């Protein structure tokens, strides 16, 4: 433990230093004035860095700046908020004692002091400091743990919404978003559109190119769908194996058809080879679009069913097309 003694009287300094050393305190620094103490602690303009201390023994009567003012200045700094200051002074009046405690002093010993009492009070102050240091470290640890927990929670939250293969929103996240967007549309009397997307002849793609190539194709299609939508209110999710779903909030049928056609051409443009696809020997998608202005009487499932029927028509009419 590091102790700083501040006293303008050389004899006092020597005596205190001697007592502390004899009591086994090896790390004792001294300052012959309040100014020197502030400098040592790095609290003056010239003070470079400044040392850390665990307890300060402070004289009161000193020229230029007295110990009470010095104590006030030291305790005013965040770095020294937990450092006990023991006043060791010839002043015995109550108002001095009162002023010392008001300035942040922890204890008050009058000169001439009793050596045993001084050491006992010093031990008590050091124990207080240790307790404060320990508590601070614990608080830091706790804060650290809670920050880690928060980050882990956020990561978990993200993961629970993500499809493992493609990294886009999963079915769970879709279901939640669909329900909340439906409620919002009911409340705000806004149209809500939904697109169901299915990759054409994907079974034969897997058969010809292998399951791994199939997975890579799904990833590419998913990323392209996400990249093709620009509004924050849009959501693309992996709906099933090779099916994707798009929620378009505040979008009417006409707008949704335009978006669907954009998605179709963007996938076509990828030009992923697919020898056994009837549609141009590349991977294509079929899309079913449905729009509703939700109200309390309509069921959200009806919108999905309508998109499903439209998708079925798109398949029947030759695939690689949008049906509304
Ligand atoms: P259609 O044009 O009528 O949609 O024909 P299709 O072959 O795409 O339709 P179907 O629904 O019969 O086939 C879907 C295929 O998608 C079957 C399955 O092997 C494949 N599939 C589903 N999920 C995955 C996946 O995660 N990875 C891979 N590689 N293939 C998948
Ligand atoms: Mg003095
Ligand atoms: Mg399918
Ligand atoms: Mg398919």
Image (tube, rainbow, N blue to C red):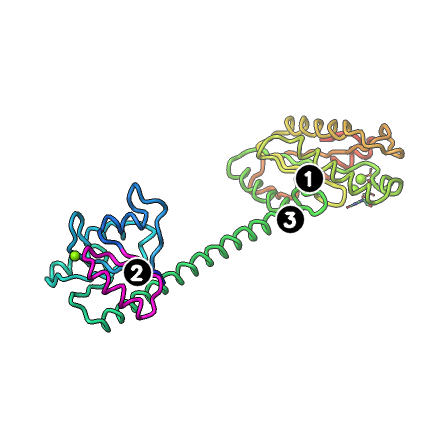
Nearer-N-terminus badge (3/2) = 2
Find residue 137 and report its horizontal and vertical position in percent.
43, 59
Q: Which residues are magenta?
A: 4-30
Find residue 27 and report its horizontal and vertical position in percent.
35, 61
How far is mark 3 from mark 2, CA to CA?
59 Å
Find residue 178 and report its horizontal and vertical position in percent.
61, 42
* Position of 235 relative to 163 (above/below): above
* Position of 9 relative to 312 (above/below): below
How far is mark 1 from mark 3, CA to CA?
12 Å
Callout 2: SS = strand
Callout 1: SS = strand
Seen from the viewer's position, the closer of residues 308 and 102 is: 102
Q: Label 3 neighbourhood size at 10 Å, few (<14), some (14-19), many (20+)?
A: some
Q: Is residue 77 magenta?
A: no
Q: Which residue is mark 2?
A: 55
Find residue 60 and report its horizontal and vertical position in percent.
17, 56
- Left or right of 116, for residue 228: right
């Amino acid at each position: 433990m590091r102790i700083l003694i501040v006293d303008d009287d050389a004899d006092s300094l020597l005596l205190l230093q001697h007592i502390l050393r004899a009591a086994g305190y090896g790390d004792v620094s001294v300052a012959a004035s309040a100014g020197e103490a502030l400098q040592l602690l790095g609290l003056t303009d010239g003070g470079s860095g400044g040392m850390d201390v665990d307890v300060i023994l402070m004289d009161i009567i000193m020229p230029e700046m007295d110990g009470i003012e010095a104590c006030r200045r030291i305790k005013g700094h965040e770095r020294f908020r937990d450092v006990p200051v023991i006043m060791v002074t010839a002043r015995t009046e109550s108002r001095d004692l009162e002023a010392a405690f008001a300035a942040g002093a922890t204890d008050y010993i009058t000169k001439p002091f009793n050596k045993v009492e001084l050491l006992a009070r010093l031990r008590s102050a050091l124990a207080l400091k240790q307790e404060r240091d320990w508590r601070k470290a614990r608080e830091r640890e706790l804060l650290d743990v809670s920050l880690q927990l928060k980050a882990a929670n956020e990561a978990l939250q993200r993961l629970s919404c993500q499809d493992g293969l493609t990294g886009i929103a999963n079915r769970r996240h879709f279901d939640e978003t669909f329900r909340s967007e439906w409620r919002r549309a009911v409340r705000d009397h806004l149209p809500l559109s939904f697109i169901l997307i299915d990759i054409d002849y994907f079974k034969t793609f897997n058969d010809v190119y292998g399951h791994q190539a199939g997975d890579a194709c799904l990833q590419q299609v998913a990323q392209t769908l996400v990249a093709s939508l620009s509004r924050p209110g849009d959501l693309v999710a992996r709906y099933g194996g090779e099916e994707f779903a798009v929620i378009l909030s505040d979008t009417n049928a006409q707008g949704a058809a335009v978006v669907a056609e954009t998605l179709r051409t963007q996938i076509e443009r990828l030009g992923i080879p697919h020898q056994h696809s009837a549609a141009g020997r590349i991977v294509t998608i079929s899309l079913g679009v449905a729009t509703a202005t939700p109200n309390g009487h309509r069921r959200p499932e009806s919108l999905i069913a309508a998109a499903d029927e439209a998708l079925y028509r798109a398949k029947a009419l030759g695939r690689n097309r949008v049906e509304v």
